[in-house]
Amino acid sequence: MPYTVDFKDVSTTGLESSPVAQALAGLRANEARYFKNKYDHDFTVTPASEDPETLAYINKVLSEERNIVIASTPLEVTEFEVDGIRMSYVFYESGLSINVMYTLEDGGKRGVGFKLSDGMDVPEELGDFKFARQKSKLAGTIRGSYFVIKGEY
């Protein structure tokens, strides 16, 4: 069942099984606030089990671009389009969030972003990436990294 993320009253709904549920909820709320403020888009997530297509798309991009397979259990996903950009997200039980930003117009920006919730370790499969720190009122310290997508998806 879809859930619209509230960034004013942060809730762990759907993320309860995560050992860093509160930090992951803050990270999810941080993303919701960004899309509401920048694009007036309501950030709505669905249990990963109810949207296997979005999860498969993200897994395909990770696998084909960098041979990355995430070990953690996916909890929630979302996919939407804003300003000609296809955005796909997955939130994992470990506290990891991955987004695929894919500009639909040729020559546009395309990349994969990783964000680590406060309190989680860097997953082994992402050990080669350097993570920058960002402070968030909703999520504490977020560590993030990314790579540019070279293929067509």
Image: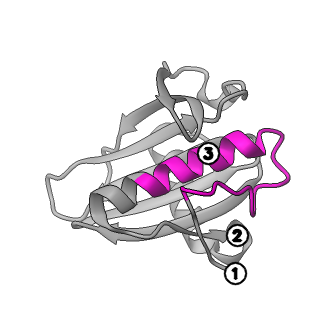
Residue 119 sits in quarter:
top right
Horizontal and vertical percent for residue 76?
A: 66, 62
If the image is split into quadrants, where does the N terminus sit?
A: bottom right
Identify the amino acid type marked 2: Pro
Q: Earlier in the sequence, mark 1 or mark 3?
A: 1
Tell me the magenta residue range. Answer: 7-33
For the residues labelled 2 and 3, the Cα–Cα distance comes to 17 Å
The 10 Å Cα crowd at callout 2, few under 14, some 14 to 19, many 20 or more, is some
Which residue is found at the position 39% from the left and 52% from the top?
Answer: 34
- Residue 126 seen: yes
Which numbered disc flags the more N-terminal residue, 1 or 2? 1
Residue most toward the bottom? 1
Residue to which mark 3 is pinned:
26
Give the labeled residue for mark 1.
Answer: 1
Percent position of residue 65, x then y = 44, 43
Query: Badge 2 is on which residue?
Result: 47
